[in-house]
Amino acid sequence: MWLWALLPISLAVFGTVGIWTVFAVAVTNGSVNLTEGIPFISNCGTYNPQSCLFSQICNICSVLSLWIVVIRYQQVQDYGDHGKANIASIVLGFISSIGISVIGNFQQSVLMGIHLFGAFLAFFIGLAYFWVQLFLTYRAEPSQDRCWVGPVRALCCTFCTILVFARSCSTFLSSLRSGSCSMPLPVCVLQPQTRHRNLQRGLRSATYKKNCNENSHWRCLLVDLCCSH
């Protein structure tokens, strides 16, 4: 049924519009400051109220992705390929789709480690799914559109691979230049957020001590007033 072809288009359009909507809401209510640089979508989606919108967008994209993965699996089977590569594709597709939902439901300001784990599942496992699909393009029974689908998929896989690894390497190198990390990449990514949380705890502790001192001062004044009378 040709209407199934609208699913990938719907996923791309909905995901793009949803991400820009979250970004617009975050900028409008002042959750992020554009003068300090262009924020990541994870930074925009970690504050209320756009965090609720971000979660729903990721959940819907996750369901659409799962739907596409199942349809593609059945399509390859109909082409006559019942091998392990097709089974691996549906497993990788399910894992990467779940990663999208994890990204949206575990914001980085709450559980940074799980948020990064979801990003790993969505991007790195999703990238592996793309390459398996490229392999299946030439493995399955020849189709009329293979002459242009194969090269387009190869180009998209190569482009996505370059982007993912370039971003990972830039994060690692920037951590090394700042002297903040000599450990593996996941630890380097977690360290800035850990320092930020420690700073927030320190500020809250200082504020609490200040309030306690002020309250003690007022209690002493009340005691003096009572004794004078």
Image (tube, rainbow, N blue to C red):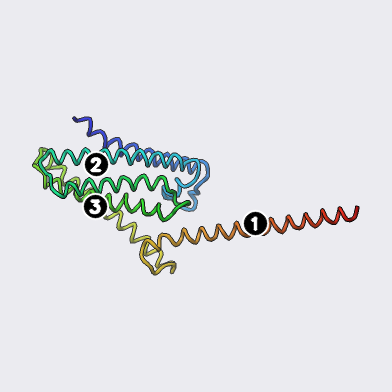
Q: Mark 2 falls on what kind of element?
A: helix
Instruction: State how far apart marks 1 and 3 are (Cα).
Output: 49 Å
Q: Residue at the location (75% across, 57% down)?
A: 216
- View extreme (left): residue: 142
The quarter of the picture where residue 152 lies is top left
Q: Residue at the location (73% across, 55% down)?
A: 215
Left/right placement of residue 60 relative to residue 24 reads: left
Q: Position of residue 137 (x, y in %)?
A: 14, 45
Q: Position of residue 14 (x, y in %)?
A: 34, 37
Q: What's under tag 2, amino acid-wise?
A: Val
Q: Nearer the viewer, residue 55 or 175?
A: 55
What residue did someone put label 3 on? 128
Q: What's under tag 3, amino acid-wise?
A: Ala
Figure disc tally: 3
Whether label 2 touches label 3, CB < 8 Å: no
Q: Position of residue 87 (x, y in %)?
A: 19, 47
Q: What's under tag 1, amino acid-wise?
A: Tyr
Crowding at mark 2 (Cα within 10 Å: few <14, some 14-19, many 20+): many
What residue did someone put label 1 on? 208
The quarter of the picture where residue 101 lies is top left
Left/right placement of residue 188 relative to residue 77 reads: right
Crowding at mark 1 (Cα within 10 Å: few <14, some 14-19, many 20+): few
Instruction: State how far apart marks 1 and 2 are (Cα).
Output: 51 Å
Instruction: State how far apart marks 2 and 3 are (Cα).
Output: 13 Å
Instruction: Indicate the quadrant containing the N terminus: top left, top right, bottom left or bottom right.
Output: top left
Q: Mark 3 falls on what kind of element?
A: helix
Task: Give the number of the disc on residue 105.
Answer: none
Q: Residue at the location (33% across, 61% down)?
A: 169
What residue did someone put label 2 on? 69
Q: Mark 2 vs mark 3: give the one in front.
A: 2
* Disc nearer the start of the sequence (2/3): 2
157 over 185 or under it: above or below: above
